Amino acid sequence: MREAVHHVVELQGDAEIVADCADGASLLEEVARTKPDVVITDVRMPPSGDDEGIRVARRLRETDPGIGVVVLSHYAEPRYGIALFADGAEGRAYLLKERIHDARELGAAIAVVARGGSMIDPEMVRLLLDSEQRRQDSPLAGVTPRERDVLAAMAAGKSNAAIAAELVLTKRAVEKHVGAIFLKLGLPSEDMVSRRVAAVLLYLSVEHV
Amino acid sequence: MVRVLTVDDHPPFRDAARAVVAATPGFEALAEVGSGEDAVELLDRLRPDLVLLDVNLPGIDGLETCRRLAAAVPAPLVVLISTDDDPGLRESAHEHGAAAFVAKQELRPGLLLTLWERHRGPAAAITPPG
């Protein structure tokens, strides 16, 4: 496995291996020592032998947010994806091992996460969207039926005033619903317009409208 | 599969765009990046078929990025996106090398399919690279 990764990295021209590690603890030590741009890790590693690679990725999000992480796995396992992307997908890639012999695929993933982008195997994306876990953790799960009506009206491009008229609510009540929706969908409080857009897109993607 | 690269500096939108793309039959989300420079630099490595490109980006803006992407060989189909509608850009998108301009609120599977088929034919006709 390591040989295959070495081979792909050598082919890139603008990347080099600074360290090899066999377990989570030595990986964190080498990260602290060599400060790499990117970590390529197996999902399974000692000591836990289960999802050590994901744990390391989450730890690095806290300690070294600028380091990109490419996680390699034999198969798309939804719980790995849910854990890996729980704090966002920036600077993270999830690739299936069957793909790493395609030098372009792994090379692209390294270049993408080094720049803070994300690359997720399509099978994992599908599983994350479709899986039972996703349904249970659906971002819309905590949204009340009334808030869902408001969200549907937002998705139709209606202003708060138009939503108030349609649902026979005061404008103030609509604003409260919209605020609650943003909160429940976990949208950061940047400017109001982009939160509205993100909420609508999330709704559309979940509802497959 | 139509492989889609999303270029937007807002992570929540990148997540939403990935979900919309994955919900589109015959499409898959290839990668998401945060700047026009990243998109241009990674174009050769990623070889996307379609690029969803935010107009308002830090660094080189979406229109300049669009011109650079459209000049590449092979050039991806570029769809300009923005939070705010821009009737002028709807009219002039092709002058910048884009297939279309759409407001982010409009982005959904049916629209992606329509745009792709209008410019490149049935999505199923695309063969994977390599």
Image: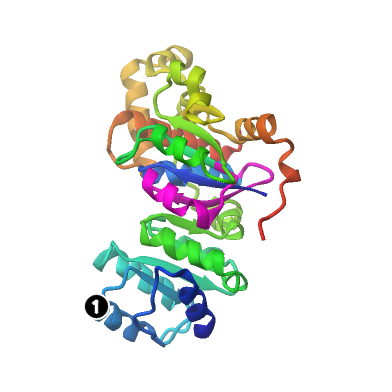
Residue in the foreground of this view, choosing between A22 and A86: A22
Instruction: Name which residue lies at 49% across and 84% down.
Output: A2
Relative vertical location of residue A101 with respect to residue A197 in this rendering, above or below: below
Give coordinates of residue B110: x percent, y percent.
64, 32
Q: Quadrant of residue B64?
A: top left
Residue in the foreground of this view, choosing between A121 and A10: A10
> Which chain letter matches label 1?
A
Instruction: Name which residue lies at 40% across and 16% down.
Output: A169
Q: Is residue B120 visible?
A: yes
Relative vertical location of residue B38 with respect to residue A168 in this rendering, above or below: below
Tell me how the rendering is colored: rainbow
Q: Is residue A202 visible?
A: no
Q: Quick check: is A188 in the magenta stretch? A: no
Q: Which residue is mark 1?
A: A32
Using a 10 Å C-alpha cutoff, classify the residue at mark 1 as few (fewer than 14 neighbours), some (14 to 19) or many (20 or more): few
Q: Is residue A8 left or right of residue A122?
A: left
Give coordinates of residue A73: x percent, y percent.
54, 73
Q: Which residues are magenta?
A: B23-50
Q: Quadrant of residue A187?
A: top left
Residue in the foreground of this view, choosing between B40 and A169: B40
Instruction: Name which residue lies at 26% across and 66% down.
Output: A64
Q: Is residue A22 left or right of residue A36?
A: right
The amino acid beneath tag 1 is Ala
Give coordinates of residue B41: x percent, y percent.
42, 52
Identify the image quadrant of the N terminus of chain A: bottom right
Quick one: which residue is furthest to the top in this view?
A165
Instruction: Name which residue lies at 50% across and 24% down.
Output: B95
The secondary structure type at the circle numbered 1 is helix
Give coordinates of residue A182: x percent, y percent.
36, 37
